[in-house]
Amino acid sequence: MSDSIERLYQAVIAARDLDPATSRTARLFQRGPAKMAKKLAEEAVEVVIDAISGKPDAVVRESADLLYNLTVLWASAGVKPEDVWREMERRERLLGIAEKLPKSPVKVPKGLPKTAPVPVVRRRIVALENRLRKRQP
């Protein structure tokens, strides 16, 4: 897979200076990181919706779109796939492949046991679930 992402990254780099009228990639670069981030977020939501809806073929297609848009954003930010792979290897050494490093210690409000779910995360999950329900037919 990393070879596929590397080839995609190289294609994105090669296309960024093409004519925006004929190249979707060049058009994204012309519009800037905010547009790239918006496209990435849209694709992520589509993957989530298709996964929840039980549509594995659509998840595959939307995941490919997600990876494309992530690669475009990486290129815009000066991040290479190898930078990401190095970080993944570092995390694997520290925590195991399936773990995500904590961003910072979680502060639990007074009165809640330390094992209680973080309220902010719970609100975000509920908001996402509500948005997904509204979009389903």
Image (tube, rainbow, N blue to C red):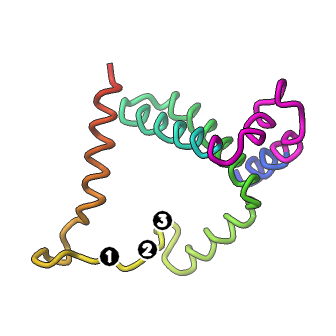
Distance CA(mark 1)–CA(mark 3): 20 Å
Say left or right for 96 vs 26: left
What secondary structure is the stretch in magenta mostly built from?
Answer: helix
Read off the residue under disc 3: 98
Q: Where does the image place residue 130, in percent across and percent down from the top left?
A: 27, 37
Tell me what residue is drawn at x 57 percent, y 79 percent: 93
Q: Quadrant of the C terminus?
A: top left
Identify which amino acid the numbered label 2 is placed on: Pro
Pointer 1 residue: 106
Q: Quadrant of residue 131?
A: top left
The amino acid marked with disc number 3 is Ala
Q: Is residue 47 left or right of residue 71?
A: left
Residue mark closest to the camera, 1 vs 3: 1
The image quadrant of residue 128 is top left
The reply to whether dot 2 and dot 1 touch (C-beta < 8 Å) is: yes
Does the residue at mark 2 contact the one at mark 3 (Cβ under 8 Å)? no
Q: Secondary structure at mark 1?
A: loop
Cβ atoms at labels 1 and 3 below 8 Å apart: no
> In the rendered view, would you say 46 is above or below 87?
above
Q: Which residue is denoted by mark 2 in the rendering? A: 102
**Whole-number angstrom distance, CA of label 2 to CA of label 1:** 9 Å
SS at circle 2: loop
Q: Count numbered badges in the picture.
A: 3
What is the span of residues highlighted in magenta in the rendered image?
Answer: 11-35
Three-letter code, disc 1: Val
Q: Which residue reaches farthest top?
A: 137
The earlier-in-sequence mark between 1 and 3 is: 3
